[in-house]
Image (spheres, grey):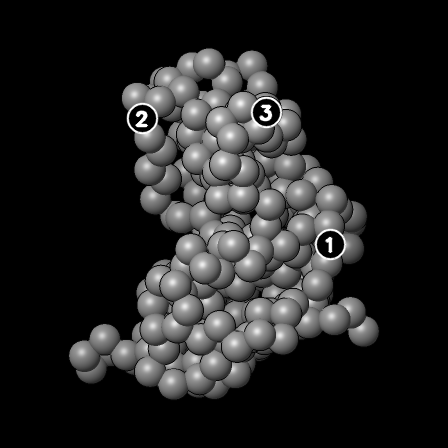
Amino acid sequence: MADLLLAIQGLSKSFGGLKAVQNVSLSVPAGSLTALIGPNGAGKTTLFALMSGFLKPDSGTVQFDGLDITGRAPHLNARLGMTRTFQIVQPFATQTVRDNIAVGAHLHLKERRSALSRAEEVAARVGLSALLDKPASDLTVAGRKRLELARALATRPRLLLLDEVLAGLNPQEIAEMIPVVRGIAESGVTVLMIEHVMQAVMNLAQQIWVLAQGQLIAQGTPAQITADEKVVEAYLGHGTAARLRAAAQAGVSA
């Protein structure tokens, strides 16, 4: 079994009377591509915030590569190698794509020339090379999603937390982004993604966790998840589950 890069144990977080995350435990092996799914409001983004240090848990622990980082500041976690993207993409609109990516590169590279060189390398990986000199404000939604991904990659993450990187994309754009995410994982970066696009989850994830009302209700392979009645009732619905199973058996995406 691969070494665990991330291990969270008994994480809980409440906002007033709302129990956003309740006693959640999961572990992410190094080198894996895994997914966290569930209905809107299930607590997925809150869980990402707890993992990465943007929120402090009421209880529970977060370990990264064996180090207890519970409540540790996000920029310190980024230096260790844990980087996250955000559901709502907010680039530096007046700066170029190159400069936006270089912001991430500066986490480890002080020299401007080195950061800009790193930005060019990362842009090539996510399909932004032709747009390096454009202002970020000129990018389409798909372009901004790629830019958010590039800025995170420029920090040289060991663990990349992707928060709905495919949200707002049309089917063709999703199909074009799937190999980009797969390529990142194949390069050695461990990826944990929150995603509602089940076509992508089933194509990419080796292991899936399902969150509903702040609690983990299931975990397993894509095949196990689509056959789990709790998941079908809480999230997928019978029609979607059947389509995903049929697609998996046929070897094509749903």
Q: Please provide percent x and percent y for residue 232.
A: 53, 70
Q: Residue at x 38, y 85 (%)?
A: 59
Q: Please provide percent x and percent y for residue 64.
A: 58, 69
Is there any visible trace of residue 39 in the rendered image?
A: no
Nearest to viewer (mark 3 / mark 2)? 3
The earlier-in-sequence mark between 1 and 2 is 2
Quadrant assignment for the N terminus: bottom right
Which numbered tag is attached to residue 93? 2
The earlier-in-sequence mark between 3 and 2 is 2
The reply to whether callout 1 and callout 2 are in contact (CB within 8 Å) is no
Q: Nearer the viewer, residue 179 or 51?
A: 51
Q: How many marks?
A: 3
Which numbered tag is attached to residue 198? none
Q: Secondary structure at mark 1?
A: helix
Identity of the amino acid at label 3? Ser
96 up-or-down from 25: above or below: above
Q: Which residue is the site of mark 3? A: 117
Identity of the amino acid at label 2? Ala
3D distance between C-alphas at marks 3 and 2: 21 Å
The reply to whether callout 3 and callout 2 are in contact (CB within 8 Å) is no
Which numbered tag is attached to residue 248? 1
Q: As drawn, is 169 to the left or to the right of 46?
A: right
3D distance between C-alphas at marks 1 and 2: 40 Å
Q: Residue at x 34, y 68 (%)?
A: 55
Q: Secondary structure at mark 3?
A: helix
3D distance between C-alphas at marks 3 and 1: 41 Å
Count neighbours of disc 3 (C-alpha within 10 A) and say few if under 14, some if 14 to 19, many if 20 or more: some
Residue lying farthest right?
A: 1
The earlier-in-sequence mark between 3 and 1 is 3
Identity of the amino acid at label 1? Ala
Count neighbours of disc 2 (C-alpha within 10 A) and say few if under 14, some if 14 to 19, many if 20 or more: some
Q: Please provide percent x and percent y for residue 145.
A: 46, 35
